[in-house]
Image (cartoon, rainbow, N blue to C red):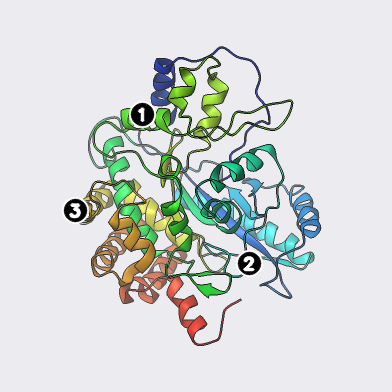
């Protein structure tokens, strides 16, 4: 969720409604042959001696100051609740991406271990209520804005973590690697990824009724901020309209608290007596959190953080194989297509398909059937995109342990909870 932005706005020329739409079309989808990918991995930091207890803020600040001295290739950022995020640089291959992030994570873990701290991968904090760690104008405004529609916003900010896979937007031309196909596939395969990798069934020490509590937060939030645009037609035009009609989270102010408008869309702002400038548009784009966010590339945001030191590698490898190998992308498209009938008229994540994925995981028979097929497609494609035997083995192990059995990582946590052997 991290977005590097400046605190406060400089004076620039106002942008018109037409200019905004043209800018959004130009900056959010940059087409060409898929050549690069990336991953953003978020983690909860915990005490090694008592993993369920929150780390005191001073200990976190000291640890993060030390981490920032490490020579990492990935960008290291901190989320509002103190979650740690590593964002890889664009990589030319799956193995390059895995190699650079794995090396950075090893260095991060070693330094944290010296301080008595560790990392854990959960889509939602299983034990503790939301707690703000960062006190910055952006997050003060975000909290104020999101509180208007319920408590889910604070939980999203402070208690959630994910694996975000970043893929090139694709060719301008139609076909399995074309922009239109990849955009459609991301929003329908996305439900399968939610179900297969769900890993957040607990909150405050109790089951929530969802395999992915994290995904349920997005479903309950303001759809203008957390939903996808309508999926029919040209992705650029659809996204541009969505950006224009989305509510403005905040109006930045270098001299004091940021203003939090109530219900003002960006389109209405452009028509006001004090219209936004280009920097306001750039900032507005960082306050929208759909399941697939176009940022020049496609940022797939629906996957829960995974268990284990290397659990993040499996969703990265499977997703990359299904999108960037042309043969796999074509077969995946045909495999996922029947799921579109369950979506109805609502966009993700609020439609029945995505709700079932978050609530039921792979106990949903249709999602289970499609997931089994998609993981098999990915397994065949992984050698073609250069995946090593270790990566292929990790995918095969995950497939056998979870997908083949209609399970997801959340089911392990639920089993242990009901067996009174609650995991730490």
Residue named by callout 1: 241
Q: SS for tag 1? A: helix
Residue named by callout 3: 341
352 lies left or right of 280: left
Q: SS for tag 2? A: loop
Which mark is first along the chain, 1 or 2? Answer: 2
- Residue 341 vs residue 183, the one in the foreground: 341
Residue 138 position within the rendered picture, expressed as x and y whole percent measured from the top left: 64, 38
Marks 3/1: CA distance?
24 Å
- Residue 27 vs residue 419, the one in the foreground: 419
Q: Alpha-carbon neighbours of circle 1 within 10 Å: few (<14), some, or many (≥20)?
A: some
| Quadrant in the picture for residue 20 | top left
Residue 379 position within the rendered picture, expressed as x and y whole percent measured from the top left: 33, 62
Q: Are marks 2 and 1 in contact (CB under 8 Å)?
A: no
Extreme residue toward the top, this view: 13
Marks 2/1: CA distance?
38 Å
The residue depicted at 52 percent of the width and 38 percent of the height is 287
Which mark is first along the chain, 1 or 3? Answer: 1
Residue 128 tag number: 2
197 lies left or right of 180: right
């Amino acid at each position: 969720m991290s977005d590097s932005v400046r605190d406060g706005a400089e004076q620039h020329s106002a942008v018109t409604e037409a200019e905004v739409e043209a800018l959004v079309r130009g900056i959010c989808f940059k087409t060409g042959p898929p050549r690069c990918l990336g991953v953003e991995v978020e983690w909860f930091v915990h005490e090694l001696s008592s993993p369920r207890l929150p780390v005191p803020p001073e200990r976190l600040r000291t640890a993060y100051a030390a981490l920032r001295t490490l020579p990492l290739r990935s960008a290291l950022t901190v989320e509002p609740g103190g979650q740690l995020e590593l964002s890889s640089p664009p990589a030319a291959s799956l193995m390059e991406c895995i190699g650079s992030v794995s090396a950075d994570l090893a260095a991060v873990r070693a330094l944290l271990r010296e301080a008595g701290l560790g990392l854990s991968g959960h889509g939602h904090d299983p034990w503790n209520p939301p707690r703000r760690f960062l006190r910055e104008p952006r997050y003060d405004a975000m909290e104020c804005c999101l509180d208007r529609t319920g408590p889910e916003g604070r939980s999203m900010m402070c208690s959630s973590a994910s694996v975000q896979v970043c893929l090139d937007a694709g060719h301008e031309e139609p076909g399995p690697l074309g922009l239109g196909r990849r955009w459609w596939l991301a929003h329908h395969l996305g439900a399968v990824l939610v179900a297969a990798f769900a890993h957040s069934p607990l909150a405050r020490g109790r089951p929530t009724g969802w395999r992915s509590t994290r995904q349920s937060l997005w479903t309950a939030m303001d759809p203008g901020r957390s939903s996808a645009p309508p999926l029919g037609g040209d992705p650029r035009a659809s996204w541009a309209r969505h950006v224009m009609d989305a509510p403005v989270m905040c109006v930045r102010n270098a001299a004091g608290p940021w203003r939090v408008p109530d219900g003002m869309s960006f389109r209405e702002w452009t028509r006001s007596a004090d219209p936004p400038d280009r920097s306001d548009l750039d900032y507005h784009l960082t306050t929208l959190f759909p399941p697939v966010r176009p940022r020049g590339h496609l940022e797939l945001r629906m996957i829960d953080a995974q268990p284990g030191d290397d659990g993040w590698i499996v969703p990265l490898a499977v997703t990359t194989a299904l999108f960037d190998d042309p043969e796999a992308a074509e077969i995946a498209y045909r495999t996922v297509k029947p799921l579109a009938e369950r979506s109805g008229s609502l966009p993700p994540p609020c439609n029945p398909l995505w709700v079932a994925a978050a609530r039921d995981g792979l106990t949903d028979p249709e999602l289970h059937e499609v997931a089994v097929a998609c993981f098999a497609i990915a397994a065949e494609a992984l050698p073609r995109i250069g995946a090593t035997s270790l990566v292929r083995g990790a995918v095969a192990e995950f497939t056998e342990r979870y997908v083949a059995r209609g399970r997801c990582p959340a089911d392990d946590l639920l089993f242990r909870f009901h067996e009174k052997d609650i995991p730490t």
